[in-house]
Image: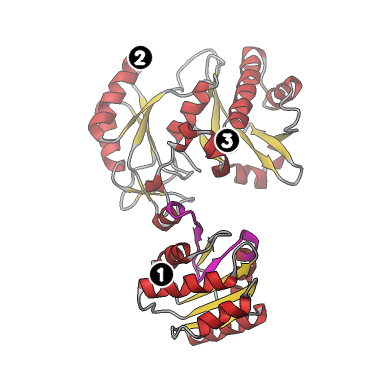
Amino acid sequence: MNIHEYQGKEILKRYGVRIQEGIVAESPEKAVEAAKQIMAQTNSKFVVVKSQIHAGGRGKGKVKGGEQRGVALAKSVDEVRDIAKNLIGNVLVTHQTGPEGKKVNKVLVAQDVFYPGETEPKEMYLGILLDRSKACNVIMASTEGGMDIEEVAEKTPEKIVKEWIDPAVGLQPFQARKIAFGLGMTGEAFKEMVKFVTSLYKAYVDTDASMFEINPVLKTSDNKIMAVDAKVNIDDNALYRHPDLASYRDVTEEDPLEVEASANDLNYVKLDGNVGCMVNGAGLAMATMDIIKLSGGEPANFLDVGGGANAKTVEAGFRIILKDPNVKAILINIFGGIVRCDRVATGVVEAYKAIGDIPVPIIVRLQGTNAAEGAKIIDESGLKVQSAVELKEAAEKVRQVVAAL
């Protein structure tokens, strides 16, 4: 589950990580109020107005049809009002959103942290994620903050420091110090960075996060270490342990079909193809998408109905798939292990009748417990549904349907 920058900073603050303070606003008027409050608290004439969407590259992104950047420095309350007007309610396009962009519903009005002092401010990068190849968490750090880490990895990989953490042992003090040394920290900034890394890792583990990315991490002019941004992803499977974090979910940032699928306990991911697929089991779903590709089609989605497929879940799956205008055919691929194939076949027939006339061809491949009985139910239903038992047979029928598109 992705969350907004301001929500990620709320988590970090609870763990003692110093953050760039800010106030969320959902209108230009509230943005002005927030700016006045922050200016009074920090004794600064400047604030930063940051669009809040689930995508990176906001500083370089622009609103559709305009020049407004997704992150902008405001030098007066009038500028805050103008920037907020240009952002809130408009669509921001970044390299991560694609050309369709994302609508900005709120902004974060944040303190200006690039104030004058004894030393020059320095931007760095710090991220924590799981390295599956080593079964360890890995802390990635770089002196090249404010840049895309992919670009740094491609052009100057020597500027990335990595430290692998055994989950059974946890982050050791020497490892936090190694990260701080790798970033060139000395004196008070070194101590601050060690504390920052330690607190950040604890936040990552305690919240069951799959990623924490702080870009940039700022060494201020008075040697404080601060999170200026926060990109956080929480493992969906662990949300039952964190009801407070589950409330951070913003469905307006998600694909409407994926939200509907989640409400029906379906695992759905929209893709760009023309053949919808409905499967029980993630591994079988991946194999089914391969079948579609080998047959000359393109999968329109990943949809796993789970082990308890019935008329209700099949009907919900049908409705979600058919809402995608690109879908020209549907392949249902069910292995009858936990669930019997005849029950699934009955569910398909009942769902078809409940929805009405479905305008695209449907191929149902059943294998496993009572597969023959399931195929018979499909064949005798009188509906425009083709049955298949073997994988090769299903692939051939998909090929014929795709060829006719």
Residue 326 visible in the current orientation: no
Q: Secondary structure at mark 3?
A: strand
- The residue drawn where x is 54% and y is 32% is 216
Q: Is residue 35 above or below residue 290?
A: above
Q: Secondary structure at mark 2?
A: helix
Q: Is residue 130 above or below residue 366?
A: above
Tag nearer the camera, 2 or 3: 3
Q: In the image, which disc is placed on residue 284? A: none
Q: Which residues are magenta?
A: 262-284
Which residue has dot 1 on it?
Answer: 322
- The residue drawn where x is 57% and y is 35% is 212
Tag nearer the camera, 2 or 1: 1
Cα separation, mark 2 vs mark 3, equals: 28 Å
- The residue drawn where x is 39% and y is 39% is 52
Location of residue 381 in the rendering, given as x and y in whole percent from the top left corner: 46, 83
Cα separation, mark 2 vs mark 1, equals: 53 Å
Q: How many marks?
A: 3
Cα separation, mark 1 vs mark 3, equals: 36 Å
Query: Does 213 sit left or right of 134 as displayed?
Result: left
Which residue has dot 3 on it?
Answer: 212
Disc 1 residue type? Leu
Disc 3 crowd rating (10 Å Cα; few below 14, some 14-19, many 20+) is: many
Disc 3 residue type? Phe
Tag nearer the camera, 1 or 3: 1
Snapshot quadrant of residue 261: bottom left
| Residue 282 in magenta stretch | yes
Which residue has dot 2 on it?
Answer: 41
| Residue 133 in magenta stretch | no
Q: Earlier in the sequence, mark 2 or mark 3?
A: 2
